[in-house]
Image (cartoon, rainbow, N blue to C red):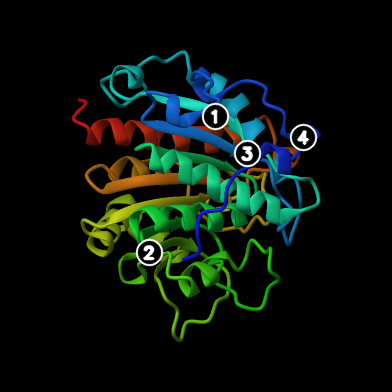
Amino acid sequence: MSDMPKASVADADLPIYGSLGMTFMEFPVVSKPADSDAEVVVSGVPFDMATSGRSGARFGPQGVRQASAQLIWEGARWPWQFALDDHLKVADSGNVLFKHGEPQTMVDNLQAHIGQILESGKSALTFGGDHFITLPVLRAYAKKHGPVALIHFDAHTDTYSGGTKYDHGTLFHHAVEEGLVDTEHSIQIGIRTAYTLDGHPFEVLDAAWVGDHGPQGILERIKARVGDKKAYVSFDIDGLDPAYAPGTGTPVSGGMTMDCALKVIRGLQGLNLIGMDVVEVAPAYDHAEITSLAGATLALEYLYVLAANKGAA
């Protein structure tokens, strides 16, 4: 793996659509993650130049943060019996800087940003943006931890090899080629579009299987596959059925229900989780913030799982 690129504000601009409104869950803002006492650092990546369908995921971080306002009042989120703030320190570092129209600046600065978070002993929760943003995130994780087990929720495998350099449908092809993921302990959930079965590097639980077996069956397969490996969760919001997530660039009918997805995320308790992203939320195609709320809720559920893994009850 190549040396970690160095993030430089001088080499990047803040696009007008990248300004930070509110923070996720009103967590405190941190400008230098390494100097914070947070255990998890939230970052936004307002980037959708790798989208092959409808653009608009650049507004995903803003939409997810805004929708999280609906989740703050509860204190201790149901069905958990503790308040997250009492057991897990989280901060929001705002949005990653990059030059509009120059995607490589996003790649370099995002990889460096996540690398700095990891080197300071913290983990990352990242909001896209289209799914391509996961590739530089995984490069930073693999540099720190070695190849990671991938738990991937999506309608698409994103392992297609014929795309362009910046393509949200090819990122896991490149991740495998670069040795970023431990394919023998990785799994994809909710797939319901065509892919090449022969030689496919990951175990796949397709959408029909998911619908037939439900959360318990899904969790049994995930845990058997991942074991005690360090695991990274990547949740493309189009893994959900469009009834639950209409606001996305490439919606596909027949996906997971929100109830099923939450039960699966909640059931990841006990695994060695080291990071997560939620991607492809495109608020312009949303209705009543359904998709943004789904993304915010999945992310918050993940944070509760991290707290539970620390012993919170």
**Amino acid beneath label 4:** Tyr
In this image, 260 relative to 92: left or right? left
Question: Could you tell me how far apart the alpha carbons at marks 3 and 4 are, in whole angstroms?
Answer: 12 Å
Residue 71 vs 42, above or below: the answer is above
Question: Could you tell me how far apart the alpha carbons at marks 1 and 2 are, in whole angstroms?
Answer: 29 Å
**Amino acid beneath label 2:** Ile
Badge 3: residue crowd in 10 Å (few <14, some 14–19, many ≥20): many
Q: Nearer the viewer, mark 3 or mark 2?
A: 3
Question: Could you tell me how far apart the alpha carbons at marks 3 and 2 are, in whole angstroms?
Answer: 28 Å
Identify the residue position indicated by label 4 in the image.
Answer: 17
Identify the residue position indicated by label 2 in the image.
Answer: 187
Q: Position of residue 296 (x, y in %)?
A: 52, 33
Residue at 63% from the left image edge and 38% from the top image edge? 96
Q: Position of residue 7 (x, y in %)?
A: 60, 44
Q: Position of residue 191 (x, y in %)?
A: 50, 64
Q: Nearer the viewer, mark 1 or mark 4?
A: 1
